[in-house]
Image (cartoon, rainbow, N blue to C red):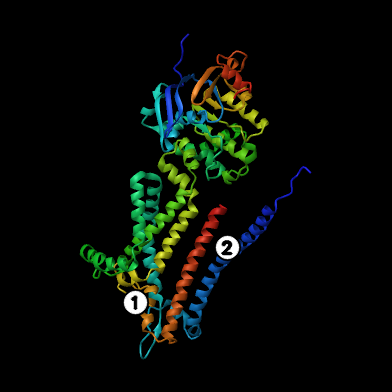
């Protein structure tokens, strides 16, 4: 069997904010078109891990990153065009940040930044992404109103639509469903299942059920270390390798 | 009894706190209302001093005529047309220079530089704002004056361009510091979200920060305009102070403010000339009021969009 080049490979990644190290040298690889769930308690480094993958962590003053992160075998830190990298990655933050623009402009933002100007093409892109994020029916009549005026759950779906708008190869979802009702969440999960045909997904979630439904493999991150990373069935099964995994998944952690 | 009675100490404190709160509320309301009172008071004072002349004046001549002969023996004429044009042209030209520079500098300080450079720039820019206007007048009189005469085809160095350059230099620090505050008030989460979408710094500045900070930036520009219109000493020294409708950048002009400053001390209290100067004050009032109103409407219009 030929193992394909991993989509993302991380080796000995360390990250610190000032004197506080939040990732203590983690290593793992994600295969193309895989869905990887990342679970773990608060402050375990899940969000920081995602921010390393698209290098937005550099935006935080005092953040120091070491080790290597490769996307398609290419070292992230040696990439000349960091904007090009970010255009290949869609990122959804747990607290939705609607840009102070109209709904349409929010979704059209990334394609426009990448240089797309044709109106018809932008229209089509906006509609597709809003449909994928299960938001189109609610906002199709008011695409010109401010995105920041939407409700919390709608804004979160707007950020999902936005993350899909530049047709990413990698999708990083950080607690994408905390403000979304269960029915809509299921619709978005269905879309994620379709997207996996051409997208690699990293899913940070506190909903262990969600990880179980979607993920091929699951990583249990705790205090900046990977406790265990294995097939989702194993992690959530009766016999994970590490006792702590079993305890966390079954809610007896502490 | 399962619920213990509230302690008496706690009850007195809450009553006290209630009164204290009312007092503070009253104080805040007073300071809010006082701003309105002061504006009205100033307007009323200026109006009363100028009022007796209002009915005697041929207003169309006063506003449009460039003939300003307040001390003529045979034929006194109070035409401020040239001064209105002078004030508007020098302010307009100053803004043409100051707005792009000021906003550009605000963006640079807030978004494109960091660390020591930023701190240094902020200190220097605030220092620039603290230079007294009379000192600017000196600079206009002795430095800009000679530079214009040497390098530009101008017969005199004290002219529209000289004053506009000074006013621009005086307005820029205000535009920069207020504009920078407006940009700083845009939450970092917007920047990071845009960054994650692959936006470059320029694209963030242009597509996110500009719309997000629009009102604050407009306020910065307006404060700059206000500074330029109201400025007196520097323009008195640098414009050439000649009653003249300018046809080129190198023509000397006279502004409304400088006229008041130069002539009020030499008029008899209660004379028509004295009253006319107060009416000029009213005109300045009207101009700044109109500018503020227009800006307010513009902001509302933008918001409705």
Q: Is residue B48 above or below residue B122?
A: below
Res A245 quadrant in image: top right
Q: Which mark is residue A109?
A: none
Q: Quick one: SS at disc 1?
A: loop
B212 on left or right of B245: right
Identified at 65% across, 32% down, the residue is A184
Residue A1 on image: x %, y %: 48, 8
B87 on left or right of A241: left
How many neighbours does mark 1 have within 10 angstroms: few (below 14), some (14-19), or many (20 or more)?
A: many
- Direction bottom: furthest residue: B74
Q: Can residue A129 be seen from the camera position used here?
A: yes
Q: Can residue A124 be seen from the camera position used here?
A: no
Residue A137 on image: x %, y %: 64, 37
- Direction right: furthest residue: B1
Tell me which chain the residue with mark 2 is part of.
B
How many neighbours does mark 2 have within 10 angstroms: few (below 14), some (14-19), or many (20 or more)?
A: few
Q: Is residue B15 above or below residue A103?
A: below
A178 on left or right of A105: right
Which is more foreground, mark 1 or mark 2? 2
Identified at 35% across, 53% down, the residue is B123
Residue B26 on image: x %, y %: 61, 64
Res A154 quadrant in image: top right
Q: Which mark is residue B28?
A: 2
Q: Is residue A22 above or below residue A144?
A: above
**In whole angstroms, how far apart are the C-alphas of marks 1 and 2?**
46 Å
Q: Quick one: SS at disc 2?
A: helix
Check disc 1 and report the residue beneath it. B243
Q: Is residue A202 above or below residue A122?
A: above
């Amino acid at each position: 069997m030929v193992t394909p080049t991993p989509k993302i490979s991380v080796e000995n990644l360390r990250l610190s904010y000032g004197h506080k190290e939040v990732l203590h040298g983690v290593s793992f690889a994600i295969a193309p078109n895989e869905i990887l769930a990342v679970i773990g308690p608060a402050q375990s480094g899940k969000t920081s891990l995602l921010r390393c993958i698209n290098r937005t962590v550099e935006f935080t003053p005092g953040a120091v990153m070491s080790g290597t992160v490769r996307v398609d075998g290419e070292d992230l830190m040696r990439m000349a065009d960091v904007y090009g990298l970010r255009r290949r990655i869609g990122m959804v933050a747990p607290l939705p940040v609607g840009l102070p623009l109209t709904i349409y402009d929010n979704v059209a933002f990334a394609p426009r930044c990448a240089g797309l100007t044709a109106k018809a093409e932008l229209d089509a892109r906006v509609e597709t992404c809003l449909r994928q994020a299960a938001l189109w029916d609610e906002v199709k009549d008011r695409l010109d109103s401010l995105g920041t005026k939407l409700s919390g759950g709608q804004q979160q779906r707007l950020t999902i639509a936005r993350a899909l708008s530049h047709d990413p190869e990698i999708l990083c979802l950080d607690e994408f469903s905390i403000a979304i009702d269960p029915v809509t969440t299921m619709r978005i999960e269905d879309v994620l299942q379709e997207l996996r045909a051409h997208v690699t997904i990293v899913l940070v979630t506190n909903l262990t059920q969600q990880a179980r439904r979607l993920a091929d493999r699951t990583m249990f991150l705790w205090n900046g270390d990977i406790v265990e990373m294995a097939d989702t069935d194993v992690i959530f099964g009766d016999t994970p390798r590490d006792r702590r995994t079993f305890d966390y998944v079954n809610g007896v952690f502490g | 009894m399962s619920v213990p009675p509230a302690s008496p100490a706690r009850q007195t404190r809450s009553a006290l706190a209630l009164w204290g709160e009312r007092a503070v509320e009253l104080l805040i309301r007073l300071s809010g209302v006082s701003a309105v009172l002061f504006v009205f008071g100033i307007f009323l004072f200026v109006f009363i001093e100028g009022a007796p002349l209002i009915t005697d004046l041929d207003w169309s001549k006063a506003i449009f005529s460039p003939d300003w002969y307040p001390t003529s023996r045979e034929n006194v004429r109070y035409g401020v047309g040239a001064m209105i044009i002078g004030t508007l042209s020098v302010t307009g030209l100053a803004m043409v220079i100051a707005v792009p520079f000021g906003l550009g500098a605000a963006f640079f300080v807030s978004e494109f530089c960091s660390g020591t450079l930023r701190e240094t720039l902020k200190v220097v820019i605030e220092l620039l704002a603290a230079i007294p206007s009379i000192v600017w007048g000196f600079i206009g009189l002795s430095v800009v004056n000679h530079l214009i005469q040497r390098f530009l085809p101008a017969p005199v160095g004290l002219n529209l361009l000289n004053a506009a350059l000074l006013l621009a230099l005086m307005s820029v620090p205000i535009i920069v510091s207020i504009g920078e505050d407006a940009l700083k008030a845009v939450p970092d989460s917007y920047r990071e979200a845009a960054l994650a979408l692959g936006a470059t710094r320029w694209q963030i500045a242009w597509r996110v920060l500009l719309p997000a900070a629009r009102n604050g930036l407009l306020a910065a520009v307006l404060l700059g305009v206000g500074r330029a219109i109201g400025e007196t000493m520097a323009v008195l020294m640098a414009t050439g102070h000649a009653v003249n409708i300018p046809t080129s950048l190198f023509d000397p002009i006279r502004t409304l403010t400088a006229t008041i400053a130069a002539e009020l001390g030499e008029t008899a209290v209660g004379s028509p000339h004295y009253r006319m100067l107060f009416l000029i004050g009213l005109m300045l009032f009207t101009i700044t009021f109109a500018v503020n109103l227009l800006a307010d409407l513009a902001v509302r219009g933008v918001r409705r969009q």
